[in-house]
Amino acid sequence: MRDYNARAVSVGIVMLVHTALNRAEQVARHWTAAGCPVVIHVDKSVPRATYRAFEKKVSDDPNILFSKRHKCEWGT
């Protein structure tokens, strides 16, 4: 059995976002306040101006980063 008390364990969060960007901001800030870095993928179908506004809104938190955008299928 491993002794996890002897090691530091960290958690990172990846978020896939295509709607409800205000809620995504709240969730991302919740995780970073707990010390978890967050990487957000915003679907490329989200208008660029909306994406830029979201990116600017969370830019004060250095633990929130963005991945390259891709268009994704979200089910059928």
Image (cartoon, rainbow, N blue to C red):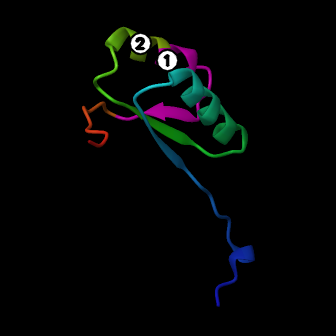
Q: Secondary structure at mark 2?
A: helix
Pick the residue in front: 62 or 17: 17
Labelled disc at residue 54: 1
Residue 5 sits in quarter: bottom right
Residue 71 place in picture, x, y as percent: 24, 32
Over which residues does the magenta segment extend? 54-67
Residue 59 vertical position relative to residue 5 in the rendered view, above or below: above
Find the residue positioned furthest to the front. Answer: 76
Residue density around tag 2, few if under 14, some if 14–19, many if 20 or more, within 10 Å: few
Provide the residue designation for mark 2.
Answer: 50
Magenta segment includes 55: yes
Disc 1 from disc 2: Cα separation: 6 Å
Quarter of the image where the C terminus is located: top left
**Kind of residue at badge 1:** Phe
Q: Residue at x 69, y 76 (%)?
A: 4
Disc 2 residue type? Thr
Q: What's the residue at 55%, 50% (across, down)? A: 12
Q: Are marks 1 and 2 in contact (CB under 8 Å)?
A: yes
